[in-house]
Image: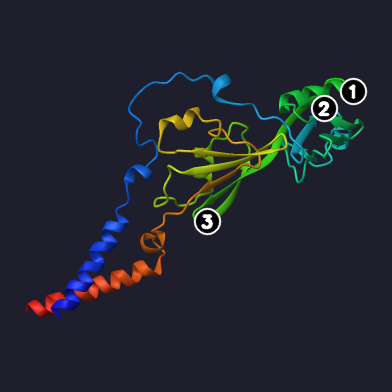
Amino acid sequence: MNKLTQFISLILVSCFFISCSNTTKLVYFSNQKPSLDTLDSTKAYTIQRVQKSDRLNITISSTDPSLTAFLNPFGIISNNTNVNSAGYLVDTEGQIDFPLLGKVKVESLTTNEVAKLIKEKLNYFYKDLFVNVNLSGKVYIINGTEGSSIPINNERLTILEAMALSGQKSDINPKNDVWVIREDSGRRAYGKIDLTSRELFASPYFYLKSNDLIYIKPNPYSWIISQSSPVRLILSLIGSISALIILITKL
């Protein structure tokens, strides 16, 4: 009985040390100290530019309801809200097919530049139009064994915002070895970032772009320490039984 008790105790102690991972790999900004940084959005943030296969939500507003309906085939304006179901797909030549204007080259432009371009072209036919352009994109997060997609409603979406919006639990997955896979201008880039370091804010991958893929590696011991792990349940039962056995043998 004593040998059995010692064996069970050895297993439990080993599992305890395995579960005690280095917390500096699990905590955000572990090397950050109270400080004040100067923000320069021009340097810290690369403005997103339209790429092939992107979708653009384009809203045209005017005082003429019939004109508004004609120039907004993907949405209906009601109380200043545009409900988009699809948007304009940027084709392989970097163009969109816009009502009345036909093919419009938008690749490599910002959303503000696209809005200005379309307004200038429409002013030939109509005056006093308001043009609003938003990028309709997503970023994708694979966190250990979980995955989700986050819509880009803000062109300054950060990796921290995306992870918060994903709703995924990442307490046990190391955050010092995170990969961001990005396709840009016909190339695929693989970036590695450390979410535990303050240097994260200076990374070109801190601000996300449409179709970015974020991959957070699973903890190698997640099969033991995960909340939903069957091994953890079994070990809990073993611990309870061993404690009961020790208590009985002491009586």
Separation of disc 3 and disc 2 at Cα?
A: 45 Å
Looking at the image, is mark 3 or mark 1 earlier in the sequence? 1
What residue sits right under mark 1 in the picture? Answer: 126
What residue sits right under mark 3 in the picture? Answer: 146
Q: Secondary structure at mark 2?
A: loop
What residue sits right under mark 2 in the picture? Answer: 62
Q: Amino acid at mark 1?
A: Tyr
Image position of 188 with respect to 240: above or below = above
Where, quadrant-wise, is the N terminus in this rendering? bottom left
Separation of disc 3 and disc 1 at Cα?
A: 50 Å
Residue at image location 75% in from the left, 46% down from the top: 85
Q: Secondary structure at mark 3?
A: strand
Give the class, few, some or many, for how many residues have Cα within 10 Å of label 2's Cα (few <14, many ≥20): some
Q: Amino acid at mark 2?
A: Ser
- In this rendering, which labeled residue sits more in front, label 3 or label 1? 3
Residue 200: tell me if it is visible.
yes
Where, quadrant-wise, is the C terminus in this rendering? bottom left
Left/right placement of residue 92 relative to residue 188 reads right
**Mark on residue 34?**
none
**Tags 1 and 2 in contact by the CB under 8 Å rule?**
yes
Residue at image location 70% in from the left, 29% down from the top: 49
Camera-nearest residue between 29 and 111: 29
Give the class, few, some or many, for how many residues have Cα within 10 Å of label 1's Cα (few <14, many ≥20): few
**Tags 3 and 1 in contact by the CB under 8 Å rule?**
no
Q: Picture quarter containing residue 229?
A: bottom left
Residue at image location 45% in from the left, 18% down from the top: 38
Q: Amino acid at mark 3?
A: Glu
Q: Picture quarter containing residue 105?
A: top right
Left/right placement of residue 240 relative to residue 73 reads left
Q: Position of residue 7 (x, y in %)?
A: 21, 73
Looking at the image, is mark 1 or mark 2 earlier in the sequence? 2
